[in-house]
Image (tube, coloured by chain):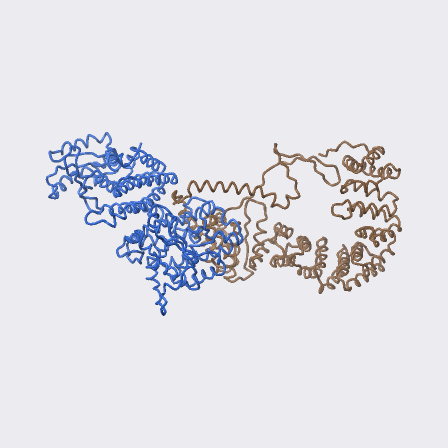
Amino acid sequence: MITPIIREYFKGLKEQNELDVVIPDLLTSMGFEVVRRPVSGNRQYGADVIAVGTDADGEQKLFVFSIKRGDLTRQEWAGADQALRQSLDEIKDVILNNRAPEHQGLKVVICITLGGIVPEAMEPLINGYMLSNRTDTLDYQVWTGDTLTRKILDGALREELFSGELRSLLRKAAATADDPERSIAHFERLVAKIAQGKADPVAKVRILYLALWILFVWGRDAGNLEAPYQASEIVTLRAWDLLYRQIEGDRGRRLDASHSFHQVVSLHLQIWDELYGKKVLPHAGKLHVLSFAVGSADGLDINLSMFETAGRVAMGGLWQLWMEPGQGAAPQTSDLPNWPARRIAQALERMPFANPTLLTPFADHHSTDLALALLLLCSVRDTRDAARRWVREAAQRIMLAYRHHGRYPADDGSYGFLLRHPESATDEYRQEAMAASVTMPLLATVAYILDDGDTISAIGEFQQAEASNCSFQAWVPNSRTEEKIWQGDPWQGSSITGLKVGTNGSELIAAQRAEAQANPDYPALSAIRLEHWPVLLLACRRLRLPVPPQLWIELMDEMRPPEPAKGNVEAAGGFRGEGKTT
Amino acid sequence: MARRREPPDISPGALSSAADDGTLETLFRDALLALDDDAGRLFKASVADAHRAGLIDLAATATGTPGPVDHFAGTVYGAAIEALELDATTVIGLANAFTARSRDGTVPYFMFDAVAGWAARDERRVNAMLQAMGDGDVPASLRIATLQAGLRVDRARYLALVTTMLVTGDAAEADAAGFVIGTVSTAEETEMSIVSDAISAALSAGDSARRASAFEAALTIGLREGSDPAGAEAVLDAVADQADARLRRIAATRMSMTRDAISDGLRRRFLALLGGVEEGEADTIEAVNMAIAERLRGVEGEPYRDLLKHILASGIADIETMDDSAHQILTANDGSLEAVVEDWIADGADRLIDAVRDITSIPASKKEMTLELDFGRFELSAEQTLASARKVVSSLTIQPVTATSIILSLMRTGQAHAGDGLETLLFNPMLISYWEGPKEYLESASPSQPSIVQERISRLLSSLADYEGAVRSTGVIPELGPTARQSFLRQLYRAEAQRKVREDMPKRSGIMDFIPITRVLHGDSVVSEVFAGDGPPQRQEFLMGTVSHSIPLARLDAIDPVGFWYQRIVLSMGKAP
């Protein structure tokens, strides 16, 4: 049965920014026209949401919703500052006397909306109030969690859109929220099934959004937001895949697709904030606290977890950066003092030094998390010094670990392999375990951007003298990326192999610039074309794909403008990697 | 309680039957295991009688029985050879037969006494044996026993022969002669003169083997109880410029066998010679270890401690090899341990710091050793103080309490300007790697410290409380933890690793090669018969138990393994990470 799952979901929603955000969506899915949504910080005279819709008697009416979370208590009814009774009086006195002209002729229904129930002891008070105030043109209704559940099941999740199989998957995903692996497995199947369905893309995204909400609330109740967080990444990417064509075509007042995608991203960031903003970042600068919070006595678990955390934290910061005014098709320097991106970057900059395992990636695929973190730190002027230090120390430690057969970043990032790595202290094993590296050229690239010549030359020397058999690589999208990446398929894109760092990094940068100039597929990607670059970064993070060098170019141009071309040779065209493998 | 076996039938008839069956040596063994000492002597005499009577043929038994001669049979053969009027050919035959049957192709030990006893009864036997050795018909290793028999038969004649061998004999003869001369007590002036002249001549000879033989003889005589040390001093002076590995080995061995006090002059010469010992001279190092072990303690032990320090600092040997010396220092209880550790830490050489680690980790107590040291006399600079402290932290990572006690001593008695650096070092990595042991030590040590050190301890403990408090109050964030699948894979991996360790344990342990392993199915003890000396075996019950040893795990090693490793490398160089 899905009903208890949804009922508990409504019961678990907080009043502000949750229940009052969900109700308008519910109304929209029921065919109501929402004319007023909650605005944080504005006094609403008791009305959280106003909508015009058809009542059960078939008559069109003006519905005014006053929303309270959970079960109704005596205190909430009449005892507190913003008690429900007071809100209802304000609606009567203020809202109804200030209706828009087009709503003047409509009968009014004031809906007392609760996430939970009206306890038996409270019923006489409510009923008495409604009876006293009911008129011919003013009616009262009570929408409890049960009512909302029924309306969702009759509306957005009606049988033809949300079959028994989907309901079962959602129920399993929610019920196993405290076991993230199982939960996310069910949820992924659910997402795939919904995406394959026949409904229009906006309706599909609305269902995904609702399902994500339900999982979020269940995860929060279970004290574990891992499954909701991962689900939110999956839903964001799938929503982009479903909606980007319509977003591109959105015109005039009908911005349904853009709005739906915005809602998904908002929920993703809300979950991010619940997990990282509230649980993790307050401890980011405290020595070893997050490392211990992993709850494992094994260095591998801590290393994997810290890089995963750094990548996710950075991703949240990059979304916020993207929302800042003036950002374009790639990250640029942010100088806005009070924007969240800056605050996140300032917390992130302390993480590697408080949790020094972040200075030594054990797997090469950590280059993605590292790139995201460095991209954010480089985008915020104040945190560039931390980025420089992170790059320098990581490079030193990786080279030392490689030299002494320690835990250098292995190409095989599977847990089973990393448990044993390094299994042998021979040159043969080392060459095999680190036959290729994205991490080292990434560090050299960022060192170049940050003008750290010592680190570049150290990496260049290391490549030449000690790791000459290791292929330094980068990844770029190709013509198959668009159709696959948002759906979670990592088998697309091209590797640029044989990158050479050289003594000052110019060869490396020139090769990446040349690729950026020559690659037609990157600018054609929907997320880039429509200036939604965090979506591409999110896909890279989720699929463990390296961050394409193109995303660094704007920052690079800003921080290390390209040297003027000499003679007839184009600065970007003179150097290339050895080859490109698709 | 001793338990004797039922004695076998040892009548002449039984001996004869056993000889016929080829089980005579087994009967020797069984009989001696069952008989007490007096009865055993009578039994050995009865064996000689049986041979005389023709009931058994010991020569035929010796050559006809396969495998090495065991201890019991060897004592029976030895007694019989001494007692019987055997001719030289028979004895030579027996010596060769026993040598051929031995595991390593050497003359069994019982034959040395047997040949010495047999030859000492007739000078012709001595001559015959020496002749056979000269012709290569019998192992040359019997030469010493034969020459000693000769000295008993005709002292003057054979002393002349032995001294001549030392001066003009071949290497094997000179070697045997040197040994024999060392055993000769020469009270009479003429003899002393003969010996002295021979040693002088051999010492000045060109070949090193002869010189070594003479050196050994002279040292043996010079170090004998009641001897004038001038003789030993003179011979040490004589080789001072030509010391080689063999001379060092002889000197170390002789010194280790000398229980008497050694004069200052002799000690100085010995230590000068032994200071030249080199890596790989295992026997010499072992002898030096034994030689200096008994003399390391107290004020007068300082020159010996200097030699030990030189050997450790030069990498010639480590504390494990110098185990007797380490044991003596550890158990001295007179400040020797502190003096040694202070000296080594103040020196700051990597190997000496490692030696401090090794020596302080030896006590098999569950509590780590703590030391209260005084570095005042070394007048260390701030940088020297810090460099030594960093090396101590790096080397004594798994002895955090010991390391903390040393750093605290440096803080109290080292250069005052190093205080801030030492405080930093105590916090990271010591206190944040080990929350309990070092903290408890600092708390207990604080009241006896000067006020400035107390202030530092107070700050450290407060910082640790903040650090620990932040970690504990945050606790575990479940979203950051490993997945269920990862935990499962880890369990599999650990199980596999433990199984591998168990399998490899016997392979890795060299000692296991010599110890047969028996799986015990029931009970909490094992009953065995144990041989104690020459007597019969005794029943003993060995209670089984578990042997365990635990070391604290550094928390930093878990939360940042590469960083912790990197930090230790930098610290081991005496630098700040």
Q: In the figure, what tint was chain A given?
A: blue
- Name the residue nearer the viewer: A581 or B165: A581
Tag count:
0
Image coords of residue A556 (percent x, y): 35, 60
Rendering quarter of residue B36: top right
Image coords of residue A430 (percent x, y): 50, 53
Residue B540 is left or right of residue A458, and the answer is right
Q: Which residue lies furthest to the bottom in this view?
A: A567
Q: Residue at x 88, y 46 (%)?
A: B87
The image shows residue A479, relative to residue B478, as above or below, that is below
- Name the residue nearer the viewer: A201 or A60: A201
Image coords of residue A308 (percent x, y): 39, 48
Using the rendered image of the protein, determine whether residue A46 is visible from the camera's viewpoint. no
Residue B294 is left or right of residue A260, and the answer is right
Residue B60 is left or right of residue B512, and the answer is right
Q: In which quarter of the image is the N terminus of chain B?
A: top right
Using the rendered image of the protein, determine whether residue A4 is visible from the camera's viewpoint. yes
Rendering quarter of residue B340: bottom right
The image shows residue A308, relative to residue A576, as above or below, that is above
Q: Note the chain letter of the brown one.
A: B
Image coords of residue B575 (percent x, y): 49, 59
- Name the residue nearer the viewer: B567 or B54: B54
- Name the residue nearer the viewer: B12 or B386: B12
Residue B527 is left or right of residue B130, and the answer is left
